[in-house]
Amino acid sequence: MRRIFLIQMMLSAALVSTASCTAVGPGTDGQEQSESGSCIVLYCSRTGNTERMAQTISTALGCDMIEVVPETPYEDDYNAMLDRASAELAAIEQGDYPVVATSVENFDTYDIVFVGYPIWYGHMATPMQAFLHEHADLLAGKRIALFASSGSSGIGTSERDAASLVPDAVFTESLLLTSSSLNSMDSLVSVWLDEMQISDNQTNADMENNKIRLTVEGGRTFTATLVDNTSAQALVEQLAKGDITVDMEDYADMEKVGTLGISLPRNDRQTTTGPGDLILYQGHNFVIYYDTNSWNFTRLGKIDNVSQTELKAALGEGDVRVTLSLEH
């Protein structure tokens, strides 16, 4: 599930975070990557706040770190930068993304990808949106952890930006720091990483060993990777006793939902879903999302390597029967 660590700001609200993106450092195409760790930190930063967060994460876990920079640096004048940011956000709504100078050939060696950015007008900063848009296929199936800095804006809209840009990724808990909490950055980042159960010796095997199978009656079979919480663990324990068949109905053109026939422990958090997300609702309802939503419920996991189009086609319209079983 995703927990949003939101530290409320005591200063006045601002439309755009003071931690905005800029072209600092090379950030060029083909930037060299090390092979030192199983995680990578991608970030953009103007005043250095998001960069400090990125460095804290990288130091704690031994991650590689790459700065995402625009091809054309942002103006030094703050108002000019705001005008450009507003224009780029409007262009993105029309499908026109700004050009960034940073690219990564592949993410094959990384178990988790940290993505950091400032909040601009409530949204993910445009260079990072452009980077995710360009690398969506390479990030499919990857575990992504978002972190952001903001004057006062929340992180929810930028989470939806990310879920839309990389619909086939698995999003974990997000971290948001505001100006009033930056002095506590080290401790807050440490708590966040602990909540995600990420340490410097974690490997992808932790996730790979937690698989289930979903069989759509008369259709396809999918595998899914479960998150590490008591809800998912309880589901695995139930499936060890036998398969569970769920009769599901469509709801709000975004999900299939049906009762498990049993109750599982709840780990409800404000969560933004994407296609393929598996959710526990009210402790006994099993939900497969094929579109985005934001609500307070429990994340169970995500279907592996399936696009939104494939998933919607497999689930079909109306009612569907899905059988859950352990993946051996």
Image: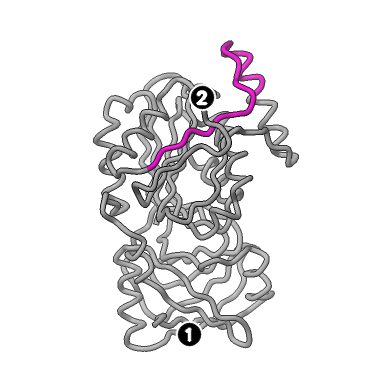
Q: Residue at x 51, y 31 (%)?
A: 119
Q: Quadrant of residue 268?
A: bottom left
Q: Is residue 166 left or right of residue 178?
A: right
Q: Is the N terminus in the top left, top right, bottom left or bottom right quadrant? A: bottom left
| Residue hosting label 1 | 245
Name the residue nearer the viewer: 207 or 66.
Answer: 66
- Whether residue 281 can be seen here: no
From the image, state whether disc 1 or disc 2 is nearer to you: 2
Q: Nearer the viewer, residue 125 or 55?
A: 55
Q: Which residues are magenta?
A: 64-84
Task: Identify the residue position indicated by label 2 in the image.
Answer: 20
Q: Secondary structure at mark 1?
A: strand
In magenta segment, residue 77: yes
Q: Using the rendered view, name the quadrant where residue 305 is placed.
A: bottom right
Q: Amino acid at mark 2?
A: Ser
Quarter-wise, where is residue 204 in the image?
bottom left
Q: CA distance from mark 1 to mark 2?
A: 48 Å
Q: Are marks 1 and 2 in contact (CB under 8 Å)?
A: no
Task: Answer above or below: position of 82 versus 201.
Answer: above
Residue type for callout 1: Thr
Left or right: 152, with 22 as reference point: left
What x and y, as percent, mark residue 253? 65, 63
Percent x, y for residue 63? Answer: 35, 43
As drawn, the residue found furthest toward the top would be 77
* The C terminus sits in image quarter: bottom left
